Image: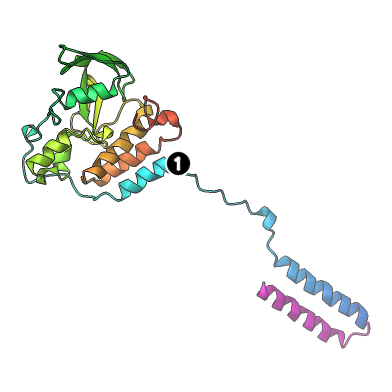
Amino acid sequence: MRLRVVMAMAALVAAIAMAACHPRVGDTLETAREVAGGLATRNVIDTTQIEPTQPAPTVPADVQSVLTTLDQLVVAERGSDVEYNRKDWRHWVDADQDCQDARAEVLIEESRSPVSFATDKGCRVTAGEWLGPWSGEVFTDASDVDIDHHVPLGHAHASGGWRWEADRKREYANDLANPPSLQVTSASVNRSKGKKPPDAWRPDNRAGWCRYAADWVDVKARWQLTVTQAEISALKDMLDDCNDDGSWGLSGGPYQ
């Protein structure tokens, strides 16, 4: 703006100087004003031709919370100095000594109808109603479902868990305090997943991606397990699908 003003003033001064030698001083002064005005006008940017900047997409608060937690996880390559042995991660245990082990506790907690037991003692669950969070299938026979360690034992081992003492491994394998840790899942889906991370396996149905990624991050953070760059990329890719309530899983929302 200052440059435009200086240029206009210079033009005006030059025109006035010329006017001193011109017989029609009045006309010359008017011409000088027009010249100066023209220079100033040509240097003004036409803001009507500039398109307004589009606001950045808003990330839902629940998704942003997951992304923030993900960014705080320790990044490291998977691997261990100790060979994985599933027997070191003892499950299913009956921590409260009520005859219902961790498997039974999860089946009871997640059933959408009252469960049935093998005997009157109420220890082993045989029937109920469970919705597979990744397949959308409904199961009524307990033998058709597994209790899935959402972050598999073998994966937890390779992500830092190999350093844990036996007690902590047992606590992880029977974590009833945190619903995302253990989930009723179709036996076939659970075995297809195995101990694969998100960069090697994800639910076939995209409707489950958002919850799957959010639960994975939750468990990793709770147990201070590491993640790889490939894992982070896969998780963020799934979290990009969190565009509506249905994206949080076939059960209808963040862990239910």
Magenta stretch: residue 3 in it? yes
Placement of the N terminus among the 4 image quadrants: bottom right
**Of the pair 116 and 10, the residue shown nearer to us:** 116
Locate residue 206 relative to residue 38 in the image: left or right.
Answer: left
Q: Tell me the magenta residue range.
A: 1-24
What residue do we see at 82% from left, 86% from top?
A: 17
Residue 14 vertical position relative to residue 65 in the rendered view, above or below = below
Residue 190 in view of the camera: no
User: Horizontal and vertical percent for residue 107?
Assistant: 23, 22
**Of the pair 74 and 169, the residue shown nearer to us:** 169
Residue 231 in view of the camera: yes
Magenta stretch: residue 35 in it? no
User: Horizontal and vertical percent for residue 199?
Assistant: 26, 37
What residue do we see at 67% from left, 53% from top?
A: 49
Coloring scheme of the render? rainbow
Residue 26 vertical position relative to residue 210 in the rendered view, above or below = below
Locate residue 83 relative to residue 251 in the image: left or right.
Answer: left
Placement of the C terminus among the 4 image quadrants: top left
User: Horizontal and vertical percent for residue 61?
Assistant: 43, 43
**Of the pair 96 and 163, the residue shown nearer to us:** 96
Q: Which residue is mark 1?
A: 60
Residue sticking out furthest to the bottom: 21
Dominant secondary structure (helix, strand or loop) of the stretch shown in magenta: helix
User: Horizontal and vertical percent for residue 87?
Assistant: 6, 32
Q: Secondary structure at mark 1?
A: loop
- How many numbered marks does the figure carry? 1
Residue 164 image-quadrant placement: top left
What residue do we see at 14% from left, 42% from top?
A: 158
